[in-house]
Amino acid sequence: MRIALRIACFGLILIAAGLIRVPFAEAQDACVDCHKASKEERLSRPALKIKDDYHLARGLGCQNCHGGDQAAVGNKAQSHSSAKGFLGKPNRRAIPESCGKCHSDPVYMRKFNPSIRTDQVKEYYTSLHGKKLREGDLKVAVCTSCHDVHAIRASKDQAAWTYPVKVAETCARCHGDAEYMKGYKIPTDQLEKYKQSIHYEMLTKKGELASPTCSGCHGSHGAAPPGIDSVANVCSHCHAATAELFDRSAHKAAFAELGMPACVTCHSNHDVVKPSDAMLTGGEDTACATCHEANSAPLKKAAELRTMIEGLSSQIDQATAILTKAEHAGMEIGHPRFELIAAKDSLIKARAETHLLKVEKIKAITDPGFIVAQKSLTSGQDLLTELQFRRKGLAVSMLVIGAVLIGLFLKIREVDRRRGPR
Ligand code: HEC
Ligand code: HEC
Ligand code: HEC
Ligand code: HEC
Ligand code: HEC
Ligand code: HEC
Ligand code: HEC
Ligand code: HEC
Ligand code: HEC
């Protein structure tokens, strides 16, 4: 009796863990069976795709979205009967509400996942996609445009259309298709440009999931990510320290007055590249030229900032080069290399601090950094001098040893000769 109970419990655990498939559970789904057998691709595709759908994994099937009776095997009239709540195929405009039947119901959703958000539909209608759908534009994205249908996967699934590194392609299926977007007055180069950006590189090549894809800046559902008043201000959401420096600078008021967005004016939006010190010079091809003439007082000040930063940067490069040389020669460089980290930190800080536009502030950071780098450079030079000294010493001692050996050899020969032939 006990053993039977144990076996039953074990069996239940295996079923729960998905290790045993219960054959009749699938076989009895009238919707899947009949649709799988259909020769019409439109009808069979949903039944073939559904094995990859997260809803199925959570115990939900065709009837949970479409209504109807999944127990009426082989009987379409009954399966599709309106008495059993059959809804048919939702038309495109009704899709958000159709998903929202569950996803906007916190009581229902929390039975599955206590922490899942239930504001997707509400948020969706704040986006241009949602607003235009309400106006009857059927080309905008609806839930199934970004999540697929019948193979809806959780966002953490690497094959999901919404998995971070997949999102850009998902959006670009429409936004990168000039033919599809022909009727709209917006560019179709966002993906192309995004692929040139530091954000794309960090996300796709370095696996840095904090680096944004399209939805990191535009939000997944709403008009912007939660907590952001407009996409133009989204950079500050992640680059808070830099934004705080900008806010205290002379540029804050100047940009606001001209109605120019803070970060995007200088860095652009989709193709944000790794900035360089040269950007500070403010030539024809930089954003500075929009507001500052060549040789104007602000650009002279900017050139001063650049000189200080480049001075520190080149000092660090020299110290690094000499320490590397010493290391390759087998010298112990742990301590000076450790010290150099402080100088590198100063450089990073100084580059961020350029957003404040204050010469004295940058000087207060680069000067101590320069001294540290100078010290590392000297240590490296000392190590190389010591190395040369050691090499000279080695040469001298080799000479002495050689001389002694020759002397010994001659002495032995002399002794041998004196003894004469035996
Ligand atoms: C015995 C076969 C059969 C069964 C069982 C069956 N269907 Fe269908 N279904 C069809 C056929 C055939 C069509 C094509 C349209 C039609 O003839 O009504 C269809 C069409 C559909 C459509 C598309 C309707 C449209 O407007 O284009 C949906 C959605 C659908 N079925 C869902 C279901 C669901 C959910 C179940 C289970 C509750 C189910 N079907 C059970 C055969 C079946
Ligand atoms: C998570 C909700 C959901 C589940 C589960 C689901 N469907 Fe659908 N189904 C939809 C939506 C939404 C559409 C409309 C898609 C569109 O217009 O792009 C649709 C469309 C369809 C269509 C019409 C396809 C066409 O191209 O005209 C059929 C047939 C269908 N579903 C059958 C099924 C069957 C059979 C199952 C179970 C194997 C199923 N669906 C499970 C949401 C669902
Ligand atoms: C423009 C593309 C897009 C549209 C349209 C869209 N989603 Fe999403 N959705 C995403 C992305 C990207 C994620 C994953 C990133 C995230 O968690 O924010 C996501 C995440 C989700 C999640 C996981 C939980 C969460 O909120 O993070 C659910 C549930 C969801 N979407 C449902 C919906 C529903 C329902 C609709 C229709 C009202 C919809 N989505 C419309 C792109 C979209
Ligand atoms: C019958 C109720 C129901 C309907 C209708 C429904 N869903 Fe779901 N959905 C769920 C449940 C329950 C989960 C599982 C939640 C969990 O366990 O985290 C889920 C999960 C999801 C997830 C995965 C969330 C994640 O963790 O990333 C996405 C995406 C999603 N649904 C999108 C949709 C879309 C799009 C539609 C409309 C085509 C839709 N759902 C219709 C109930 C439903
Ligand atoms: C099914 C096609 C489709 C998909 C997929 C799609 N969009 Fe859209 N999107 C549109 C259309 C159509 C418009 C309306 C353009 C207009 O009216 O200017 C639009 C508008 C927008 C706008 C507003 C543009 C403006 O005029 O200011 C943004 C931003 C946007 N989409 C971002 C995204 C992002 C991010 C994704 C992916 C997460 C995405 N879209 C996925 C079709 C799509
Ligand atoms: C680093 C943040 C960021 C990323 C990543 C990003 N965008 Fe944008 N995007 C913006 C900003 C900022 C604007 C300008 C919005 C404004 O002026 O109101 C914009 C504008 C747009 C527009 C309006 C038309 C245009 O080009 O000006 C569309 C459509 C759009 N983005 C789609 C996308 C798509 C698709 C992706 C992914 C391939 C993407 N964006 C990635 C920040 C971003
Ligand atoms: C979702 C968070 C997020 C958003 C939004 C975002 N970034 Fe980034 N950004 C990152 C991450 C993460 C990195 C890579 C790590 C780093 O260098 O800080 C990065 C890197 C950068 C870099 C290169 C930094 C360097 O040291 O080389 C610049 C410049 C930049 N972002 C500017 C912007 C601008 C401009 C915007 C708005 C249009 C923006 N970012 C929006 C997260 C974000
Ligand atoms: C939207 C217009 C605009 C852009 C673009 C712009 N500036 Fe300015 N900048 C101003 C205004 C206005 C002031 C404050 C008034 C003044 O000193 O001329 C200012 C002040 C400065 C100052 C501080 C001057 C002081 O005396 O404190 C520096 C340095 C500076 N800008 C450098 C730059 C650099 C470098 C760029 C490009 C990377 C740039 N600016 C881009 C408008 C702009
Ligand atoms: C007036 C033009 C200008 C504006 C406005 C501007 N930046 Fe920069 N940014 C620069 C320049 C120039 C550099 C390169 C400094 C260097 O390397 O010497 C830079 C460097 C950066 C870096 C890399 C260095 C660091 O701080 O880690 C980030 C990140 C960055 N900017 C983000 C932002 C953000 C976020 C905003 C908006 C709050 C913004 N920038 C506004 C010109 C600008």
Image: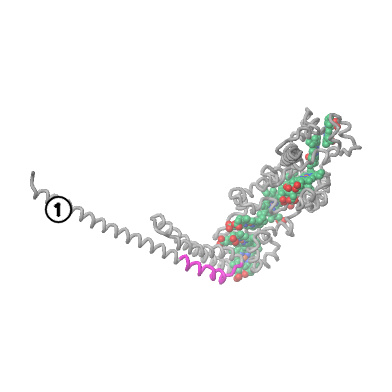
- Do we see residue 188 in this rendering? no
Task: Tell me where residue 85 appears, x and y as whole percent.
Answer: 89, 39
Residue 13 versus residue 322 in the image, above or below: above
Residue at the spot 41% in from the left edge and 62% down from the top edge: 380
Residue 369 on the magenta segment:
yes
Instruction: Name the residue carrying label 1.
Output: 411
Q: Quadrant of residue 330?
A: bottom left
Residue at the spot 86% in from the left edge and 32% down from the top edge: 72
Q: Residue furthest front?
A: 1
The magenta stretch spans which residues?
356-373
Residue at the spot 12% in from the left edge and 48% down from the top edge: 416
**Foreground pick, 4 / 347:** 4
Disc 1 residue type (three-letter): Lys
Q: Is residue 345 left or right of residue 260?
A: left
**Foreground pick, 232 / 384:** 384
Residue at the spot 69% in from the left edge and 61% down from the top edge: 260
Q: Quadrant of residue 157?
A: top right
Secondary structure beneath dot 1 equals helix
Most common secondary structure along the magenta stretch? helix
Residue 290 versus residue 197 in the image, above or below: below
